[in-house]
Amino acid sequence: LSDCLACDSCMTLEEGARVFQQNQKEFFRVLNLNKKCDTSKHKVLAVSLCPQSLPYFAAKFNLSVNEAAKRLCGFLKSLGVHYVFDTTIAADFSILESQREFVQRYQRRNQEEHALPMFASACPG
């Protein structure tokens, strides 16, 4: 979140407030609270791993990407995280959807003035 450019292009004000609450300080606060209370009162912690982060960890620790994912998942669960999700499939769907839209726009380029260019991006944060 510290890399967010705050461009306001990806979320509403309410979503922004919720994302702002998901920071390192809050993460460790909830981990510590969960350690002190009964498991029935635990707040559920979920972490998502983006496909761009795994090669970094793999290279840093001289591991394969799959081994880095397994170790990172194990580490997070040892801290007390309940769920760890890999968002690679979501990124793949996003690429496929962008591809589909581009093909449709390309086929309409002669009939529709604003079919091209098509701008697409991913959050740089």
Image: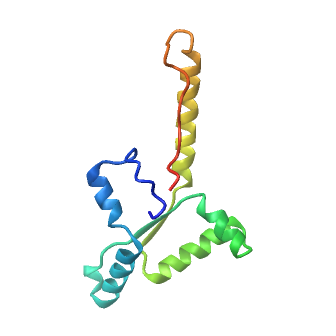
Task: Name the residue nearer the viewer: 102 or 42.
Answer: 102
88 relative position to 47: left or right? right
| Drawn side of residue 81 relative to residue 118, left or right | left
Does residue 72 sit above or below 11 in this rendering? below
Residue at screen point 69% across, 73% down: 60
Tell me the residue at 32%/67% (across/down).
Answer: 21
Residue 75 place in picture, x, y as percent: 54, 79
For the N terminus, the image quarter is bottom left
Compare residues 93 and 15 and report the one nearer the observer.
15
- Image color mode: rainbow
Q: Is residue 72 above or below residue 119?
A: below
In this rendering, the count of numbered labels is 0
Percent x, y of residue 118 = 54, 28
Residue 115 horizontal/vertical position (percent): 51, 19
Among the 4 quarters of the image, the one containing residue 20: bottom left
Asked if residue 99 is positioned above or below residue 112 in the image, the reply reads below
Quadrant housing residue 104:
top right
Residue furthest toward the right? Answer: 62
The residue at 71%/69% (across/down) is 59
91, above or below 72, in the image? above
Give the farthest residue toward the top.
Answer: 111
Nearer-the-camera pick, 118 or 31? 118
Percent position of residue 15, x then y:
31, 54
Residue in the image at 49% along x and 61% along y: 3
